[in-house]
Image (tube, rainbow, N blue to C red):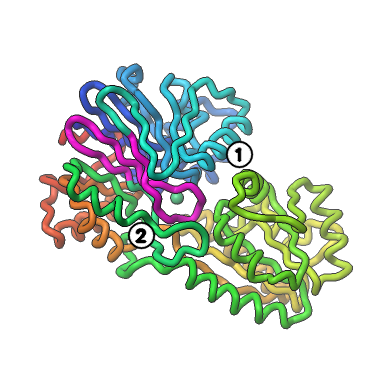
Amino acid sequence: MKIYTIGGYNEVGMNMTAVESNNEIVIFDMGYNMSRLVEYSHELEDLTTLEIVERGVIPDDSILKNNAHKVKAIVFGHAHLDHCGAIHKLIDSYQSKIVGTPYTLDIIKRIMKDNKKPIKNELVELNPKESLSLSNNLDLEFIHVTHSIPGTVLCHLNTPEGGFLYANDFKLDNEPTFGEKPDYSRIKKLAHSDLKAMVIDTTRIYDEKRCESESVTKLNLKHHIDMVFEEKGLVLITTFSSHIERLRNIIELNRKRREIVMLGRSLCEYVHPAVRRKYININGITLAWKRRSVESILEKVDKNRENYLIICTGNQGEPNSVLTRLAQGNYENLKLKKNDNVIFSCTTIPTPQNIENRAMLENKLKKLGVRYYKDVHSHGHIMREDHRDMIRMVKAENLIPAHGETERLASFASLAIEEGYEISKNVHISQNSKILNL
Ligand SMILES: [Zn+2]
């Protein structure tokens, strides 16, 4: 079995891995490097794909160049942009089918449409607990897990040389507030199935604990919402637009006390398909992103501020988001002021750009006398002790940490060593554009 570690082995994000067995290849993920995407966003349209690769925005898949005909499928375990955002730039080299859960494919279709790219590849929906035959030798199975976007799965590929598990982004939440807990019985059976290798997400490997459940965050969020509703100002909450479980909780915790408006483009992009899949109910909620409609909604809100809850974009302080614009006084019809409250139901993703953007946003809010609450949030990624659980549960022959720079991958390796693995023998710290021969 050959593992092509294409992207996400020198950085957080830009995930792309391929597996080859018996001259057949399956690709997992084609993601953006999100901080580079922000850094180069103003010039991306003028750059060729090669130039975008050179700037480190998307994975360099040239290592597969002469083998594209061997590719049997491109598989996406979930729809975060650091896993699927680069599809429109890379897909032209491959004719194979694209496989994902229904919600993941909804988002992929939207990405292709936004980039004016027709989809030439066959799209195949696969649900958790289902399998798909990719060839005479390869079977793909999806296993349900929890994360921070609907439709997240572990991808289990069965090959004549043993199994391969792509476990890139998930958490082990035993008390999710939406959907089932992870399919532990299936995960544990992998230990008895000749599992040759596991690629695993290490973004939160430094946190020496288990990841907190979403139900803990829900309780924390309830406390914040109840307290700020006591003040007679406007209340704004911002979170990740793809975090449908969190958005459901915010709507539920409002308990119809205030009229909810959702404002911002990315909210529309993730909430609309979630409504169609019945993952979220937004009856009675106004959802808008175009400047004119946002202005007219804000005019209504301003007349009755204490009766509204605004859910909006801007959790990372993004310059074009609704929250940043509000803080800058860019809207004619509503100005933030004293007694208004902002709940950040998120953490700042620690890239220099995000840190700077958020600091600027918080400064503006402070100057306006707006009170804000940070980190009302739990992460969507397994942490160090979850990793230990996972290593023990699946008992993979080889471990390949991913979704991090060398330091993160090495930190995972030290944990694997504690669990009896040996560096370079059966736990492998790779780099982008390398091939591991197992
Ligand atoms: Zn993710």
Pointer 2 local density, CA inside 10 Å: few below 14, some 14–19, many at least 20: many
Residue 170 relative to residue 217: left or right? left
Pointer 1 local density, CA inside 10 Å: few below 14, some 14–19, many at least 20: few
Segment colored magenta: 140-166
Which residue is tagged 1? 42
Q: Residue at x 80, y 74 (%)?
A: 306
Can residue 235 be seen here? The reply is yes
Query: In this rendering, is residue 363 above or below 330?
Result: below
Q: Of helix, strand and loop, which one carries label 2?
A: loop
Q: Residue at x 59, y 65 (%)?
A: 249
Residue 406 relative to residue 114: left or right? left
In the image, residue 2 lies at what x, y percent? Answer: 21, 31
Which residue is tagged 2? 382
Q: CA distance from mark 1 to mark 2?
A: 33 Å
Q: Nearer the viewer, mark 1 or mark 2?
A: 2
Query: In this rendering, is residue 45 above or below 310?
Result: above
Identify the amino acid type marked 2: Ile
In the image, residue 86 lies at what x, y percent? Answer: 48, 35
Q: Is residue 3 magenta?
A: no
In the image, residue 12 lies at what x, y percent? Answer: 39, 49
Q: Residue at x 29, y 52 (%)?
A: 187
Q: Residue at x 48, y 66 (%)?
A: 214
Identify the amino acid type marked 1: His
Is tag 1's residue or tag 2's residue first in the polypeptide sequence? 1
